[in-house]
Image: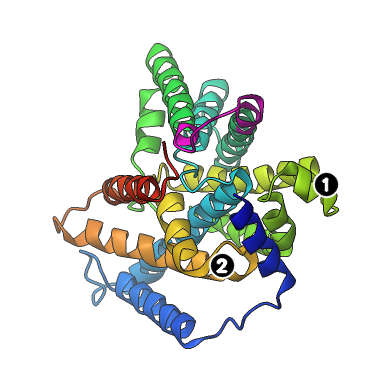
Amino acid sequence: MQQLMKTRVETLSQPSSRLWTKSFTFAVVSVFGLAVLSLFTGVYDLSGDFDMFWITRVPRTVALMLTGAAMAMAGLVMQLITQNRLVEPTTTGTLEWAGLGLLTVYLLVPAPSLMMRMTGAIVFAFIGTMVFFWFLRSVKLRSSLIVPIIGLMLGAVISAVSTFLGLFFRASQAIEGWFVGSFASVQIGRYEYLWVIVVVTVLIFLLANRLTLAGLGEDIATSLGVNYNQLMMIATGLIALSVGVVATVIGNLPFLGLIVPNLVSMFRGDDLRSNLPWVCLVGMGAILVSDLISRTIIKPFELPVSLILGTVGAVVFIMILMRQRKKGGVR
């Protein structure tokens, strides 16, 4: 832990490295190529009606890229402020709380608008994330592995509550649609709220240095002039905003926030400001690849993207656990 703190402080004291390196340029070109491939992948023949290109293909590709950036970025911030590589919206119950918020809106309002559903998801995601952070600060944990286990347990409880309410009030279809994270229904007029993610990205980049200091712990961050509690509230709000928007428009996308930040941190360290462009870019690439697989593996049908991400994410989760065990990080 002391070595990690020393590394982060030294990183902050050094000038930021140049962003447009050869590797970053190659990554940008690769993601752009995947986006072009996504635009021209599908069952519908565009030669007969090119209007469908702008109605469905462009919104879907844009939604994929914004969603990938949002979930990867949320995972990066959560891992930084909790000082735990195994934390992300899936392993903290944040996504399940967002689903409960969606269901609550459906129960209170007969035909809620997209904005109403989004507001409910954001509010409940914020509450759930704050509950998780409060629990971590209240209980002394001996192993980093206990943190995601607690989050998964909380998420399972909230998911069970949502299922019970859905069955009791005969609103099961509302949560069934949320559990299947798919981009099949994305079209013009249904994805525009995802552009909020761009604003969230800018705010996180502006707060990057302070969030990196917050990752050193409350005492050190406070001694360095950071208002720790206020910063935690802002970070939690940004996480909830990203997760709530994605959960409303797309649905449940597991483990994306776990895979991408760990891969980037493995090669680039823990500086949020320099890692953020890489995390957003790799998140875009990861979800574009998952979506291409989901659309082609059983063509002309398609699998939910959440199925691809859940399968790959579970494998990566186990690999990270094994890697930390070899280093002595998990007991």
Name the residue that disc number 1 marks. 227
> What range of the chain is rendered magenta?
133-148
Residue at 48 percent of width and 47 percent of height: 249
- Image height of 15 relative to 1, above or below: below
- Seen from the viewer's position, the closer of residues 178 and 4 is 4
- Seen from the viewer's position, the closer of residues 290 and 326 is 326
Q: Quadrant of residue 237?
A: top right
Relative to 252, is 103 on the left or the right?
right
How far apart are the two marked residues, 2 and 1, measured between alpha carbons?
23 Å
Q: Residues within 10 Å of mark 2 (few under 14, many from 20)?
A: many
Mark 1: which amino acid?
Asn
Residue 23 showing in the rendered view:
yes
- Seen from the viewer's position, the closer of residues 125 and 269 is 269
Relative to 188, is 181 on the left or the right?
left
Name the residue that disc number 2 marks. 275
Q: Residues within 10 Å of mark 1 (few under 14, many from 20)?
A: some
Could you say whether the residue bearing mark 2 is in a helix, strand or loop?
A: helix
Mark 2: which amino acid?
Asn
Q: Residue furthest top?
A: 168
Could you say whether the residue bearing mark 1 is in a helix, strand or loop?
A: loop
Q: Quick one: quadrant of the C terminus?
A: top left
Q: Earlier in the sequence, mark 2 or mark 1?
A: 1
- Image height of 291 relative to 177, above or below: below
Picture coordinates of residue 99 (x, y %)? 48, 32
- Seen from the viewer's position, the closer of residues 133 and 108 is 133
Relative to 314, is 207 on the left or the right?
right
Picture coordinates of residue 324 (x, y %)? 40, 48
Residue at 33 percent of width and 40 percent of height: 180
- Image height of 157 relative to 119, above or below: above
Q: Residue 257 — which label?
A: none
